[in-house]
Structure formats: C-alpha cells, structure tokens
Image (cartoon, helix red, strand yellow):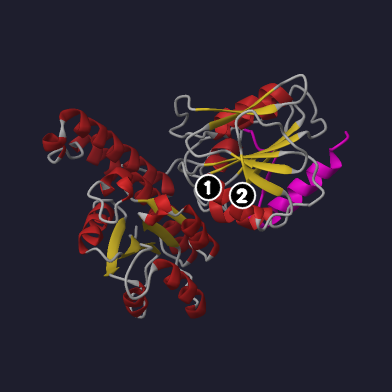
C-alpha cells in the first residue's frame, strides 16, 4: 500500500512539527512537505504533489483565505482541510473557506494558534486526512488503505489517550500502543463485502410528511451541492444531522440558506416544523421530532453521545420511525462509521421510503454502506442525482 501524502501549512514551526508527528505516527500517512504561509505553499506545490493539505487561516504574507482564492486561479485541485484557531471564534470565516472550496475544517483546541493540546484532535486530523486525501489518492490511481483501516487506528489512539489521561500528564508521555494493538494493525484486512439483507416492511410507503437526512465526513460540500437543486415548491419539512462541532451550525445553515431555494436555519428547541423549511441540528445537541396534538415539534437535548456523536443521526432517525412510521423519507449520505444505519433500518421496517448515497460519489462510503448492507436502503443514488430523487419522491408521494 502507498502512503497518503500530506502537506502542512502553518506559520508556527512548533505547530508544523506537532502536526507532522501526528501524521507520521499513523500507518498509511506521511508528511511530504511543510509551508509557513500561502505563498510558500504555492511555491512548494510546484515540485510536490500531496493528496491533501492541512491549512492554517491566520498567516503572514498570504493567509488561508487568500490562498484558497489563489488556488482557484492556479487550478490546484488538492483537497484542503482548514486547521485553525480562528475557526472557533470566526465561524463565518470558516464557512467562507468552505465556500471557496475547502473540503472540511478542524478547530485547534483551546482557541490558540499554537496549541500544545493539538493531540486532542488527532483523531479528527486522521479521519479528515484519510477520508479526503484517500479519495483523492484513489482517484489518481494510488493504492492506499481503506478508510476503515484509519478508523481502526483512530480508535486505538483515542483509547490510548484515555488511559494516559487517567494515569496523569507525566505518565501520558510514556504511554504507547501495546504490542497487541500493533499486531492488530499489521494483521488488519478490509472487511469482506456483505450481501445486503432484505427488509420486508410492515406497510407500504405512505405519503411523505417529512424528509430526514444524516451525513458526516464529506457532508459540508455534499450538502452544498445537493441543496442548490432542491425544488423550491417542496412542502415537506427537512431535518438534517450533519456531524459538526458546536458554534458552527448556525453559520453553516446560513451559508446553505444563501444557495438553497428553501429556508435553511439552525434548529431551535420547541419550534414547530414548517412546510418547505430545512432544519440543521445544532452542534453538540441531539435532535428529535416529538408528536404534539397541534403539530410536531423539534426537541434538542444533550443526552449521552450515540455512536460517538452528538448530534447523532441514529437519534434523529429513531424519532422519525416512532412519530411518522411509513410517512417519511430517510436519506443517509457520505460519512465514516455507522451512525444512522441501524435506525434507518427501523424506518424501513415501518415502511418509510429510504435512499443512500452510492459508493462512487461518497468521500467515505461508511454510513451508507452499513445501511445498505443492513437492507435499510431502497435505492442507492449518486450525489449529483440525490436532489432530483428527493424532489421526485417528495412530489409523487405528497398526497398518497
């Protein structure tokens, strides 16, 4: 297997070294270059060919936003992961980066440009690099490890860090993966493709009264691409769980509202579901739909994480299955892991209509793959066709 090639662009030499250590300590990833600002990065890209770039925002000479603008002119197509402290305080700037073509973002812990706690987000760094960089590498003919291999490493590293924190800071420095952990990595093999299960629903699909969407890695750009083409005349409310940290979903909703013909807002606790309105689950809050005599409403809570996430797609889909039965459309899209798959299967059992993003158009074919193998997905759809398929089903089954 070839390594996914990574470049790091940050004005702090310390940060470049800390990030490089996280990357180089991960089997299947390697740092091939470092840059201290956007101008330096452009110069180094003349001779280096990374599969993914980690980009700071606040830098001298040419900052991250300026680089993203210049990137379009230079036709640099390498995926960009924004890794910055400003992302925390300046969510609007982060959304601007996504609008300019960045694939995703990660916030430095503690809001510091030089964060010695950068290891706290090492799992997110590994996930983003392996997802976006892996997709780019495969598209260009490289043979790299499956995203599940990196998810396996991520879980091992996170378990190691939890043990280390329990032992204290000094002991944490000495904690490494055990020999058994290393052996499990070296003997890792991709999961065998499973023949999809068959779910026989209790009832036929009825009229569609709500559309529920679950999405994760690759989601920000996928939703931007899809929402542009939703039908302005759609009458069903749309509820969305996109795995995203607290403090960003309001700006994310606002950025989607600028391109979507429907109204898009961050969901609020207790608000009613309005026709033709899109609700984005707030970061760090589960979103559920609750039945009320005068009309169903949104409920938010901070219950325990489900599948390692809050908001969790499973939590949303579980409430949709309970409240709407066969009168719903569930959609599961690109994302690492399995969040949403089990409860999409429950929705399907009750007769709900279901769609899943196909492998070819998914940045990570994880969540939709698990759902498909469980028999939860009626039809797999390419990202380019997803809005059209939703429009068609929602229109055809509005009054059924």
Which is nearer the N-term, disc 1 or disc 2?
A: 2
Q: Is residue 202 left or right of residue 185?
A: right
Furthest residue toward front = 89
Residue 387 x %, y %? 71, 52
Name the residue rendered at 76%, 43% in the picture. Answer: 276
The magenta segment is 375-400
Label number found at residue 317: none
| Secondary structure under the numbered disc 1 in the rendered image | loop
- The residue wearing badge 1 is 365
**Residue 20 in view of the camera:** yes
**Residue at the location (44% across, 41% down)?**
191
Mark seen at residue 358: 2
> Compared with residue 133, is residue 121 higher up or lower down, i.e. above or below?
above
For the residue pair 21 and 39, the one nearer the viewer reads as: 39
Residue 322 belongs to magenta span: no
Q: Residue 392: say if magenta.
A: yes
- Can I make out residue 122 in this image? no
Residue at 35%, 77% in the rendered image = 39
């Amino acid at each position: 297997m070839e390594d996914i090639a990574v470049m790091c662009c940050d004005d702090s030499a310390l940060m470049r070294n800390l990030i490089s250590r996280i990357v180089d300590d991960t089997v299947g990833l390697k740092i091939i270059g470092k840059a201290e600002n956007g101008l330096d990065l452009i110069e180094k890209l003349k001779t280096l060919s990374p599969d993914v770039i980690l980009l700071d925002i606040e830098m001298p000479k040419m900052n991250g936003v300026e680089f993203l603008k210049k990137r379009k002119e230079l036709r640099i197509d390498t995926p960009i992961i924004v890794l910055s402290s400003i992302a925390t305080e300046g969510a609007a700037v982060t959304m601007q980066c996504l609008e300019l073509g960045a694939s995703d973002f990660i916030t430095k812990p503690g809001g510091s440009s030089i964060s010695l706690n950068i290891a706290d987000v090492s799992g997110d760094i590994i996930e983003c690099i392996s997802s976006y960089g892996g997709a780019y590498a495969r598209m260009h003919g490289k043979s790299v490890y499956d995203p599940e291999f990196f998810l396996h490493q991520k879980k091992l590293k996170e378990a190691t860090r939890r043990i280390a924190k329990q032992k204290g800071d000094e002991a944490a420095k000495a904690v490494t993966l055990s020999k058994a952990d290393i052996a499990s990595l070296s003997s890792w093999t991709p999961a065998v493709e499973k023949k999809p299960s068959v779910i026989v629903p209790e009832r036929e699909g009825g009229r569609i009264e709500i559309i529920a969407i679950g999405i994760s890695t690759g989601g920000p750009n996928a939703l931007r691409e899809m929402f542009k083409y939703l039908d302005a005349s759609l009458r069903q409310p749309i509820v969305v769980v996109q795995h995203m940290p607290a403090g960003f979903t309001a700006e994310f909703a606002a950025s989607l509202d600028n391109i979507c013909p429907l109204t898009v807002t961050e969901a609020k606790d207790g608000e009613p579901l309005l026709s033709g309105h899109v609700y984005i689950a707030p970061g760090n809050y589960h979103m559920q739909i609750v039945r009320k005599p005068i009309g169903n409403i949104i409920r938010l809570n901070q219950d325990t994480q489900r599948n390692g996430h809050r908001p969790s797609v499973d939590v949303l889909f579980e409430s949709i299955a309970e409240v709407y039965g066969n009168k719903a459309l569930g959609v599961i899209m690109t994302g690492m892991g399995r969040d949403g798959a089990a409860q999409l299967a429950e929705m399907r059992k009750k007769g709900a209509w279901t769609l899943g993003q196909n492998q070819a158009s998914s940045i990570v074919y994880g969540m939709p793959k698990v759902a498909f193998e469980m028999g939860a997905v009626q039809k797999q759809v390419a990202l380019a066709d997803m809005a059209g398929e939703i429009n068609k089903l929602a229109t055809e089954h509005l009054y059924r």
